[in-house]
Image: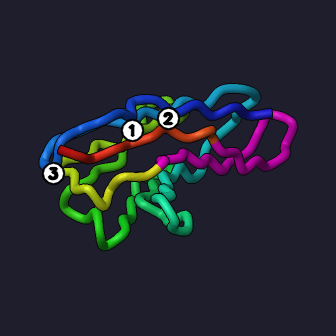
Amino acid sequence: QVQVVESGGGLVQPGGSLRLSCAASGSIRSIDVMGWYRQGPGKQRELVAVIHSDGRARYADSVKGRFAISRDYAGIAGYLQMNNLKPEDTAVYSCNVIGGDFGGLSFDSWGQGTQVTVSS
């Protein structure tokens, strides 16, 4: 079983920055894809950014040029640097990891989410 925990959310003024962290633990052989998703008030969950094990990253058009996704060297922790935040970025941000465990099984695990509120 793989556990995922996010941290780093909070209240920030428009134009400010936050850095979210995603920590995965458990029987992890490899994480192939790590992604950040968000769900704003009254909205459906949407993909924010995703990074593959080879470093390829993809972003939602709404965050390109403002957000940056990264992973640590071991590949089991990830980050979402969010700059120039806007009120429309307000949402619960969740981390998703997809990979394989030491038992030869695949996993697709989610964290509980961390609240990001952008308001003056």
Q: Secondary structure at mark 2?
A: strand
Label number found at residue 110: none
Tell me the quadrant of the picture where the N terminus can be found.
top right
Q: Which of the 4 image quarters holds residue 17?
A: top left
Q: Are marks 3 and 1 in contact (CB under 8 Å)?
A: no
Q: Residue 46: give x, y in percent of width and height.
A: 50, 66
Q: Earlier in the sequence, mark 1 or mark 2?
A: 2
Q: Residue at x 76, y 29 (%)?
A: 27
Q: Which residues are magenta?
A: 92-110
- Say which amino acid is labelled 1: Tyr
Q: Residue 48: give x, y in percent of width and height.
A: 42, 60
Magenta: main secondary structure = strand
The residue carrying mark 3 is 84
Q: Residue at x 53, y 49 (%)?
A: 34
Tell me the quadrant of the picture where the C terminus can be found.
top left
Residue lying furthest bottom in this view?
61
Mark 3 neighbour class, 10 Å CA radius: few under 14, some 14 to 19, many 20 or more: some
Q: Are marks 1 and 2 in contact (CB under 8 Å)?
A: yes
The residue carrying mark 1 is 79
> In this image, 103 relative to 22: left or right?
right
Q: Please tell me which residue lies in front, 113 or 49.
A: 113
Q: Nearer the viewer, mark 3 or mark 1?
A: 3
Q: Residue at x 68, y 48 (%)?
A: 99
- Say which amino acid is labelled 3: Asn
